[in-house]
Image (cartoon, coloured by chain):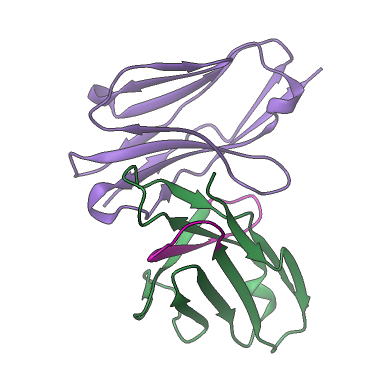
Chain colours: A purple, B green
Amino acid sequence: AQKVTQAQTEISVVEKEDVTLDCVYETRDTTYYLFWYKQPPSGELVFLIRRNSFDEQNEISGRYSWNFQKSTSSFNFTITASQVVDSAVYFCALSEVGSWGKFQFGAGTQVVVTP
Amino acid sequence: GAVVSQHPSWVICKSGTSVKIECRSLDFQATTMFWYRQFPKQSLMLMATSNEGSKATYEQGVEKDKFLINHASLTLSTLTVTSAHPEDSSFYICSARDANDPKETQYFGPGTRLLVL
């Protein structure tokens, strides 16, 4: 069975601070995809990144960066120089190739950025 | 890019009534769609897999007679909450996969908020 753990329930930071969101996953499959989504108060999920299990390269996109470490089954997400607009719930998710499309979501981390 | 829409975006109904939620893929065909439910302050939980032209597959603990799913075309899946009760109040989100996309990108709809009084 697959499982995604986001141990941080809420993180509060002041604008311009960096914030790192942790994600640890469990799966028996060797081929899988990992995702991060942002969910603002409107509720609509905003896609941030998809990473397949064979690609351990870290990725940077603007102020966002991701660190994928297969050895520790972690896929952490960092927001650099946070802004108020970054305030949202962030979900880490896993989808195994064998059941592609079925997402196992973590519990989510609420990020609160104050001016 | 590909877009998935849901209708209605929100609905309020009386206890005991049935509510239908539509999920449409706007510019691509989706042989498979998925329905998720999200209670306030909680994560998204997969309810069922909707397969075009065949019966839906439900996750453990989801009542198939209560949550009727119909996927009659390659662009439309519907979720009907039958005899809704206050505990069914939730945020329902669908997702769809582009059948012709080699990257197999999954797209989420904007969600439907259901409030049962």
* Residue B34, horizontal then vertical, whole percent: 45, 63
Question: What residue is rendered at 57% in x and 66% in y?
Answer: B23
* Residue B67, horizontal then vertical, whole percent: 51, 79
Compared across the picture, whether B51 is left or right of A89 comes to left
* Residue B38, horizontal then vertical, whole percent: 58, 58
* Residue B43, horizontal then vertical, whole percent: 54, 50
Is B59 in front, or is A5? B59
Question: What residue is rendered at 58% in x and 51% in y?
Answer: B42
Q: Is residue B39 highlighted in magenta?
A: yes
Name the quadrant of the C terminus of chain B.
bottom right
Write down the region rendered in magenta: B25-43
Compared across the picture, whether A23 is left or right of B44 comes to left
Q: Is residue B23 above or below residue B106?
A: below
Is B102 in front, or is A55? B102
Q: How many numbered discs, if any?
A: 0
Compared across the picture, whether A30 is left or right of B75 comes to left
